[in-house]
């Protein structure tokens, strides 16, 4: 059971780990872990589910173990996760006020 597994860093999370909502529904599997390597910041996940690839932002991840990622979102909220940009990975643009980056994702 994933609650008994110790939490892990995003750096060692592997594609194929199950992704479940806060109410226990499995919505897909990890396809890709996104990070900003220069600043060592976890940025989010791309998951593959029955509705294609979806983006999960880092604050929406409650817990990661070797086998399971648990989200802060319930299944109703997870149903509206944005699609992965069909042009490829996320596009980053500078946020000059905060010195960070923001993603351009297409909403459904």
Image: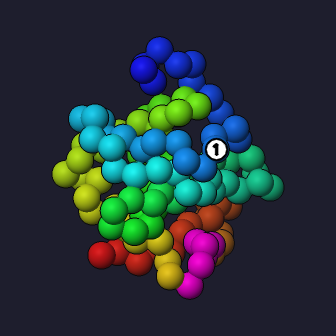
Relative placement, left or right, of 98 versus 67 is right
Q: Residue furthest left?
A: 76
- As displayed, is residue 51 above or below residue 76? below
Question: What kind of secondary structure does the magenta stretch mostly adopt?
Answer: loop
Residue 35 can be seen in this image: yes
Q: Out of 89 and 42, give the one closest to the viewer.
A: 89
Residue at image position (41%, 36%) is 70
Residue 61 can be seen in this image: no
- Tell me where the magenta segment starts and ends, as one range: 87-92
Quarter of the image with the C terminus is: bottom left
Q: Out of 16 and 93, give the one closest to the viewer.
A: 16
The image shows residue 51 at horizontal and vertical percentages of 33, 67
The image shows residue 1 at horizontal and vertical percentages of 42, 20
The image shows residue 84 at horizontal and vertical percentages of 47, 71
Residue at image position (53%, 42%) is 17
Q: Secondary structure at mark 1?
A: loop
Residue at image position (71%, 56%) is 36
**Residue 19 sits in which quadrant?**
top left
Relative placement, left or right, of 61 versus 88 is left
Number of numbered callouts drawn: 1
Relative placement, left or right, of 36 versus 86 is right
Q: Out of 67 and 85, give the one closest to the viewer.
A: 67
Q: Residue furthest bottom?
A: 87
Q: Residue furthest top?
A: 4
Residue 46 is inside the magenta segment: no
- Callout 1 crowding tier (Cα within 10 Å): few <14, some 14–19, many ≥20: some
Q: Residue furthest right?
A: 38
Residue 89 is inside the magenta segment: yes
Q: How is the image coloured?
A: rainbow
Residue at image position (55%, 48%) is 16
Q: Which residue is mark 1?
A: 14
**Residue 22 sits in which quadrant?**
top left
């Amino acid at each position: 059971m994933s609650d008994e597994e110790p939490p892990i860093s995003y750096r060692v999370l592997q594609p194929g780990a199950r992704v479940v909502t806060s109410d226990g529904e499995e919505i897909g599997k990890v396809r890709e872990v996104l990070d900003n390597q220069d600043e060592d910041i976890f940025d989010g996940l791309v998951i593959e589910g029955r509705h294609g690839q979806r983006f999960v932002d880092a604050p929406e991840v409650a817990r990661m173990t070797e086998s399971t990622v648990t989200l802060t979102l319930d299944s109703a909220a997870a149903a509206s996760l944005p699609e992965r940009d069909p042009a490829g990975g996320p596009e980053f643009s500078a946020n000059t006020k905060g010195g960070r980056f923001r993603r351009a994702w297409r909403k459904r």
